[in-house]
Amino acid sequence: MDTLSNFIGGRYVPFDPDATYPIVSPVDGAFTARVHEADEALVDEAVMAAHRALTGPWRDLTQPQRSDLLNAVAAGISERFDDFVEAEMADTGQPRHVMEKAFVPRGAANFEFFADLVKNLPTETFELRTSHGDALNYALRRPKGVIGVICPWNAPFLLMTWKVAPALACGNTVVVKPSEQTPRTATLLGEVMRAAGVPDGVYNVIHGFGPGSAGAFLTSHPRVDAITFTGETTTGTAIMKAAAEGVRDVSFELGGKNSAVVCADADLDKAVEGVFRSAFLNTGQVCLGTEKVFVERPIFEAFRDKLAARVQQVRYGRPTERDTTYGPLISQEHRDKVLSYYAQAVAQGATVVTGGGVPDMPADLAGGSWIQPTIWTGAPPDAAILHEEIFGPCCHLAPFDDDDAVVRLVNATPYGLAASVWTQSLSRAHRFAAAIDVGVVWINSWFLRDLRTAFGGAKQSGIGREGGVHSLEFYTETKNVCVQL
Ligand code: NAD
Ligand code: 6OD
């Protein structure tokens, strides 16, 4: 059984066996770790370590030196690649190939990308000429201070490094609170930070839950200067209230209820594969994932049948086994929530095309939170599965005949995170992209990421944008200097 400690001021805090909670494997229900839950005093220690580090050797680094350090962190992640893969598989239960091909490499790439970006960042200058004299204005970027980084469990390492890398690249220090369910990779990153020579107190990790625990202690701490959060919209609301005290800035990536629109002229096989990935990757636990699919009527049945056939090919199994393509949900509690939507869907009149329940698993996996990937059709317009974020491996298919009408259905949600459109028509693709109210639209693709682009949600799916210079806007204060000439 692993033991996981808090990482504060460059060292792992001695593990307190009397203040722990257990980690249960989503794969088989076995206890795999005990985590030291940080109390308010430990959270204070972490925040104050981060605060002190702002004025230590970290502040005196030149930008190229700081970029070199971040590149050393990226190299450290690559050197410990297998350890990160193992850690993330143990926490999430998701297949090895997803970790090896996507989620762990993105952790290293996040550090490399922001190390590079900040080195080459111009700032604005304005020459002012008036009848009273001339002036030159120029902008300086300064770190915001201590950044509270609060992360979810669905892609823990990718999402955490997506925030920590730009925060550090801009000269801030961080206190990270990973999800209580997926603490391993944030903890392991402490070893890499130390080996890379990142000064003590720049990267800190505290473990625990949200309300009444480490999450709330962190967001209410007066020395936290800004908070970046990824998670549920309701949690974002609570964090925003905490951030109001002291008028701290927030950046939020929140929930979604995302659609795919598949036009009759789409490349059918590519659309099927793309929608399959978007609805079922990571067992549907991706904020950008598709839960509503609108298919133009002439290809509706062909699309439905091909998608169902594709779904039936998933291979359940332990994440460590190379031929596993499909993992469990994160926890029994989350499975209960998703299964309650499976039951409501049928009760409210939807037809199950495939799935709809719990698979028969071999005895050694029977304690895991396994669930069948599921497709529905025919749900009435007010069905819960069409309006609430499920965050599971499921989607509803509906035929459409009219582009304006389908846009209204896509937009009929308080969320506005992402959408995908599948068509060979350039004009139609651009018209859909302009009309759908979301932060990210993919055309003939999904989750194809360019780290220079703005990433975030519209409506209740978020506040602000991260990615490229947008991250730097959040992680720095811009100071204007006006010089009368
Ligand atoms: P969650 O909101 O329950 O928890 C996220 C984190 O917030 C955890 O670390 C948790 O301990 C902490 N937390 C909870 N209450 C808190 C409080 N009052 N104060 C401080 N911290 C608190 O989310 P989750 O269940 O871990 O993740 C799933 C959700 O995340 C889904 O809604 C999904 O859409 C969303 N998500 C969004 C994005 C995006 O980019 N928009 C990405 C991934 C996940
Ligand atoms: O790719 C990213 O930068 C990002 N934030 C992905 C979010 C995935 C959500 O589950």
Image (cartoon, rainbow, N blue to C red):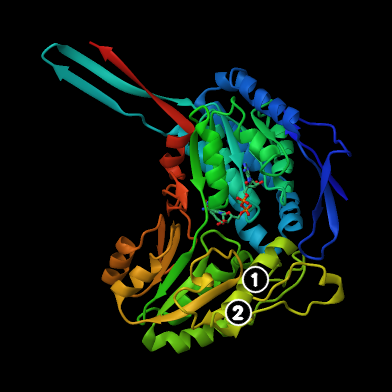
Q: Find out if the beta carbon at label 2 lies less than 8 Å from the nearest ligand 2 atom.
A: no
User: Alpha-carbon neighbours of circle 1 within 10 Å: few (<14), some, or many (≥20)?
Assistant: few
Percent x, y of residue 183 = 73, 47
- Please identify, in this view, whether the residue under mark 2 or under mark 1 is nearer the observer: 1
Which numbered disc, 2 or 1, marks the residue that appears first in the sequence? 2
Query: What mark, if any, has residue 340 been given in the picture?
Result: 1
Residue plotted at (57% across, 52% down): 232
Residue plotted at (59% across, 22% down): 54
Provide the secondary structure element on which disc 1 rests. helix
Relative depth, front residue between 195 and 353 = 353
Q: Is residue 369 left or right of residue 1?
A: left
Q: Amino acid at mark 2?
A: Val
Quarter holding the C terminus?
Answer: top left
Percent x, y of residue 290 = 50, 68
Query: What mark, if any, has residue 311 been given in the picture?
Result: 2
Percent x, y of residue 243 = 53, 34
Q: Is residue 394 left or right of residue 5?
A: left
Query: What mark, if any, has residue 146 been given in the picture?
Result: none
Percent x, y of residue 75 = 64, 42
Residue plotted at (85% across, 48% down): 2
Q: Amino acid at mark 1?
A: Ser
User: Alpha-carbon neighbours of circle 2 within 10 Å: few (<14), some, or many (≥20)?
Assistant: many
Provide the secondary structure element on which disc 2 rests. helix
Q: Is residue 199 visible?
A: no
Mark 2 → mark 1, Cα distance in angstroms: 21 Å
